[in-house]
Image (spheres, rainbow, N blue to C red):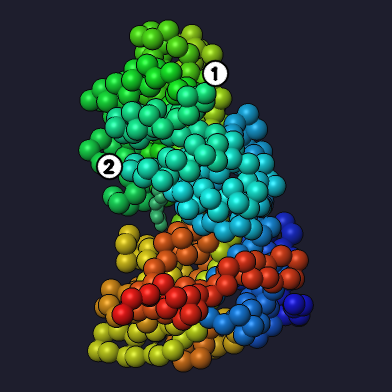
Amino acid sequence: MTVSLHPSLPSSLPGDPGALSRLLDGAGTDGPSVWPRSARPEAGGDVSVGGVSLTEAADRFGTPLYVLDEQEVRERCRTYRAAFPEADVVYAAKAFLCRAMAHWVREEGLGLDVCSAGELALAVTTGFPPEKIVLHGNAKSPEDLRTALRLGVGVIVVDSASEIARLAAITPADARQQVMVRVVPGIAAGGHAKVRTGTDDQKFGLSITDGSAQHAVARILDQRHLELVGLHCHIGSQIGSVKPYVTAVRRLVGLLARIREQHGVVLPRLNIGGGHAIAYRPGEPSLDVGVLADRVRTELADGCARAHLPLPRLMLEPGRAIAGPAGVAVYHVLAVKRTREHTFVAVDGGMSDNPRPALYGVRYAPRLIGRLSSAPPRTVTVVGRHCEAGDVLADEVELPGDVRPGDLLAVPAAGAYHLSMASGYNLVGRPPVVAVSGGIARVLVRRESLDDMTRRDVGL
Ligand SMILES: Cc1ncc(COP(=O)(O)O)c(C=O)c1O
Ligand SMILES: N[C@@H](CCCC[NH3+])C(=O)O
């Protein structure tokens, strides 16, 4: 697919990082753009990503549509590897996984964090080396654990006391499975209460405060078939500041020191999870990976020096920050309705392809694409097509006042936790994912058809 650039707009923006955000995110915005770096304004109000026109993609593949910028994913992987050359960076597949995504992150030298036999099998059957995979889960099923052992995953992160005996019991007599303990360091961080996982009294991990982390360590060290290789923590998601990570490192190094005192064991690895924030709307902060690397590295070096511990090998698990900014969702407007207080702009997707506004009250910045409008902006509520008044995609956003059925809306920062959390609600079918790169668009995941949905319905 080729694109023609609007003659009055620059196709590349050398030396002015704010220019793209001013052009795409709105005049006066000086922060980093929420669009993929390849995004360009095109003639007639169009926008291209990866050299592919979004309006042409909508025509060709239909809407709702998820467009994923391959180079953006790859560059984000490279940013992590460059910032943390001494560490193992594993991509958290829960953010978004498909075979191509697994290939890209592997080619960029990352490992993979999975949390079900399904994610694991998809990755391994597409060629992802199992030893580079970490298995998570607060309630791993027998199937999850059996599949992990059968396929030979690198590390299983133990999340409960009962999992230790279950895992030890099914590990083959001639094998030794590497495990870590998921530790709750007692830190409140994250973009919403529902995604804060570093505090005591929630379902993930084993607490330092009540001693269950220490207890799990002792039990694992007693198991011949389990090899404890380190500690893990994941304190939450959409965390915009490095401070909670520094605190987490300090507390985990403290626990490493106590483990050495009590058991005479020096654990060689420390996994600090993911959770790095991205911007969903222009002007919102994102976590600076370079600053994170500097502060974590310093804290780890200082803490280990104080405790006379050798430096453990660091591991981290970004999900959202790799996939999120690479994705753009495209919808058609189906209806516009004015009530006494609101203008509702209803699109052909909704909470079945993006449950995040309904779950966490997340705010997005949709943009009209595919035509130019000189109508003054109007504050509208972009809603979905599902049978719930709470099916809102973007509350109180500005769109041109003449927005109408047939228009296209593009929603940036849509690459993580949209399709991976999509549902079959109202049997509308989940949207396809199209990769864009170098002016070429290719389907990675096709649209869910009525046939796909009805095939599972086998009873009468
Ligand atoms: C154990 C673990 N690691 C990594 C992640 C990735 O988090 P994020 O996508 O916020 O980077 C998650 C999800 O929050 C998680 O539960
Ligand atoms: N699903 C959440 C974050 C949870 C991350 C998984 N532990 C989101 O959309 O923001």
Q: Where does residue 58 sit, x and y in percent of width and height?
A: 59, 81
Badge 2 marks a residue whose secondary structure is loop
Which of 39 and 353 lies nearest the eye of the viewer?
A: 353
**Comparing labels 2 and 1, the label whose residue is closer to the camera:** 2
Quadrant of residue 100 within the rendered picture: bottom right
Residue depicted at 47% across the width and 64% down the height:
419
Q: Give the structural element (helix, strand or loop) at label 1.
A: loop
The disc placed on residue 203 is 2
- The Cα atoms of the two marked residues, 2 and 1, are separated by 30 Å
Q: Point out residue 261 in the picture as x, y percentages from the top left corner.
A: 38, 8
Where residue 29 appears, x then y in whole percent?
Answer: 53, 64
Above or below: residue 45 compared with residue 179: below
The N terminus, quarter of image:
bottom right
Which residue shows up at 65% across the image and 48% down it? 127
Report the amino acid beneath label 1: Leu
Q: Report the disc number at residue 268.
A: none
Q: Amino acid at mark 2?
A: Lys
The residue to which callout 1 is attached is 311
Instruction: Give residue 417's position: percent from left, percent from top.
Output: 45, 59
Mark count: 2
